[in-house]
Amino acid sequence: MQNCKRMDIFNFHNLIAPLTIEDFFHRYWEKSFVHNIHNNPNYFDQILTIADIDALLSQQNLIPDGIKMMDKGLNIPSERWTRSDTLLNGTIRTVVEPKKLFELFHNGHTVIINSAERSIPRLAAACQRMEQQLKFKVQSNIYITPPGSQGFALHYDPHDIFLMQIKGPKTWLIYDSGEELPITYRSFKNEPKLVSKFDIHSGDFLYIPRGTPHEAYASESSTIHVNFSLKPVYGFHLIEEIARIAADHEKFFRQTIPHGFQSEEDQKNYLNEFKEELSELIAKIKPEQLLEKQKNIFAKEQLLNFEGRLINSLQLENITSETIVSRLNGFTTISEYIKNTWVIRFGEQKVKIPAFVEKDIFMQDEPFRINQIKGLITDQGRLEIVRRLIEAGFLKIDQLK
């Protein structure tokens, strides 16, 4: 598939282009791999560049959390590429030793940066946008492989992968072994059979469904690619929620199952009652209730982008009734009406808006002046509410007046 345009604004549409959202989810999602050739080595520059990775790994006091060195699936002990530093207060801290790390790289070992979105702001923003579109948790891992090397032997992943090739080429081999959407890694059911072998180049995209056996290696050139690993909600998670509801609200399911002294007749009666109780429980639970619970979990665990929060915090002391503010976008909120108060939750944040204040102005996308807030409230009260919402990262300051 061909697409030569540059990705100017990152979103899921551009990541899978030229496929449409409908085509991708109908024809490929959880079914078949996709390789999109963009013929543009800079296609993903808006998300990540080699300079971003270099800036991270060149730090003299880089904490090694998330960083690994691998060789064909074998982990290289961190003692071989870290050092211990003693801080002024006497605390001993382990940090990456760039000299040792790059020596291992030049000797054929792959550098892996797991959860790279925690350290690279633009990658964090990309993960956040993907999360908000898919409503699934997303993690990004970076793989840096030297020439003629292989980080992992043939394997499959128990999660879907969206891959951006930052530097290529890299040779990929895709196999089939009859795995059916696994959620944990197990030995292959059948001997994997080679389905396709191809090179991906800088700027190319690759989608690999979970359970698809694959391997990759660098030939004459070093390579870099980024995996976006999805952590979605599966159907069995909804069944787990039913089990939680049963444990919390139904006495029958908190009772022990038949013990060893009970007769076969007792066990038979128990199983019949179990079927009846289970059927009644399922009949009482609305499927929408189960999905709503997962939405609440996502809203709490979502990745938040607090870029500009310090700038806004430093301006709080200068806001007036004429100050123009607006809602920060790019995150999911859950609104609840509790005891005459609107409670808005996002991530670990919780903000409150009194019922006597019109909340719609806070939820709109358009900027507004603080004195436009309606309700039975004084000017000072308006300022106090806005300050709390700015401190929580819900509102931002557009113009001081």
Image (tube, rainbow, N blue to C red):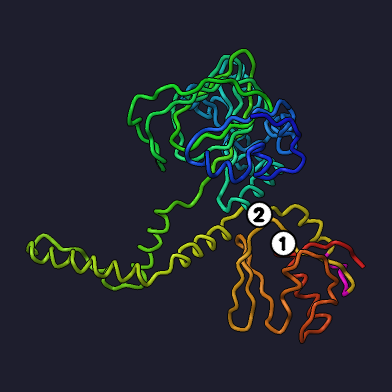
The image quadrant that residue 1 belongs to is top right
The residue sitting at the bottom extreme is 376
Asked whether 128 falls inside the magenta stretch, the response is no
Asked whether 319 falls inside the magenta stretch, the response is yes
How dense is the environment of label 2, judged by Cα within 10 Å: few (below 14), some, or many (20 and up)?
A: many
- Tell me which segment is drawn in magenta: 316-321
* Residue shown at the point (38%, 58%) measured from the top left: 240
**Distance of mark 2 from mark 1, alpha carbons?**
9 Å
Q: Does residue 55 appear in the picture of this structure?
A: no
What is the x, y in percent for residue 311?
Answer: 81, 56
Residue tagged by mark 2? 304
Which one is earlier in the sequence, the residue at label 2 or at label 1?
2
Q: Does residue 305 appear in the picture of this structure?
A: yes
Depth order, front residue of 298/364 = 364
Residue tagged by mark 1? 393
The image quadrant that residue 45 belongs to is top right
How dense is the environment of label 1, judged by Cα within 10 Å: few (below 14), some, or many (20 and up)?
A: many
In contact (CB < 8 Å): disc 2 and disc 1:
yes
Q: Which corner quadrant holds the C terminus?
A: bottom right
Badge number at residue 13: none
What is the x, y in percent for residue 205?
Answer: 62, 32
Is 239 displayed left or right of 7 in the figure?
left
Is 113 displayed left or right of 388 in the figure?
left
**Relative to 201, does residue 226 appear above or below in the rendering?**
below
